[in-house]
Amino acid sequence: MAGPAAIEYRIDRRSGVATYLQIVQQTKQALRLGLLEPGDRLPAAREVVEATAINPNTVLKAYRELEREGLVEGRRGLGTFVTRTLGGAAAVDDAPLRSELADWTRRARAAGLEKDDVSALFTAVLDRTFKGDQPG
């Protein structure tokens, strides 16, 4: 049986994003990057509460949302387990792209951009690039 997944949730109380959604988003990101794979166990709610000082119901709400989306399943007495991955990128060797992005990020930082500036710039370009791909 798989042990606990190597994921540590980081909660940003100033982000304006609901805490449970931050957990959902970070879990999905780990799935896309191949850090979580089917069979991995998510940290127990108690462990997340201890690490982040958030309400246990918030963790459970996030896990229920992930279960509703078919990404994880709760097994009574055993924990919450990943049932599927999200990565189209998982099948592709992303090392060259990751390296280019890391170089770009270092250049942006050297140019004086803060983390939030880089995130906003990247998101704006990402949204523009994928604009035509959105349904509806």
Image (tube, rainbow, N blue to C red):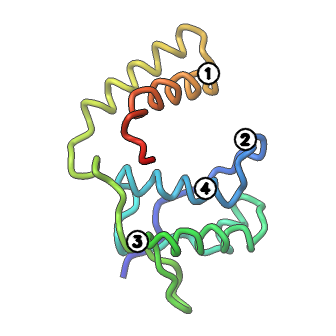
Q: Quadrant of residue 47?
A: bottom right
Number of other residues with Cα within 10 Å of mark 3, as a class: few under 14, some 14 to 19, many 20 or more:
many
Q: Of the residues shown, which amino acid type is indicated by label 2?
A: Ser
Q: Secondary structure at mark 1?
A: helix
Q: CA distance from mark 4 to mark 3?
A: 15 Å
For mark 4, what is the residue?
9
Q: Nearer the viewer, mark 4 or mark 2?
A: 2
Q: CA distance from mark 2 to mark 3?
A: 28 Å
Going from the N terminus, do you reach mark 3 or mark 1 first?
3
Q: Of the residues shown, which amino acid type is indicated by label 1?
A: Asp
Q: Quadrant of residue 133?
A: top left
Residue at 72% x, 54% y: name it: 18
For mark 2, what is the residue?
15
Going from the N terminus, do you reach mark 4 or mark 1 first?
4
Q: Secondary structure at mark 4?
A: loop
Number of the label disc, if any, that sits on residue 40: 3
Number of other residues with Cα within 10 Å of mark 4, as a class: few under 14, some 14 to 19, many 20 or more:
some
Residue at 33% x, 32% y: name it: 98
Q: Of the residues shown, which amino acid type is indicated by label 3?
A: Asp
Going from the N terminus, do you reach mark 4 or mark 3 first?
4
Residues under numbered marks 4 and 2 in contact, where contact means CB atoms less than 8 Å apart: no
Q: Residue furthest bottom?
A: 76
Q: CA distance from mark 2 to mark 1?
A: 14 Å
Q: Nearer the viewer, mark 2 or mark 3?
A: 2
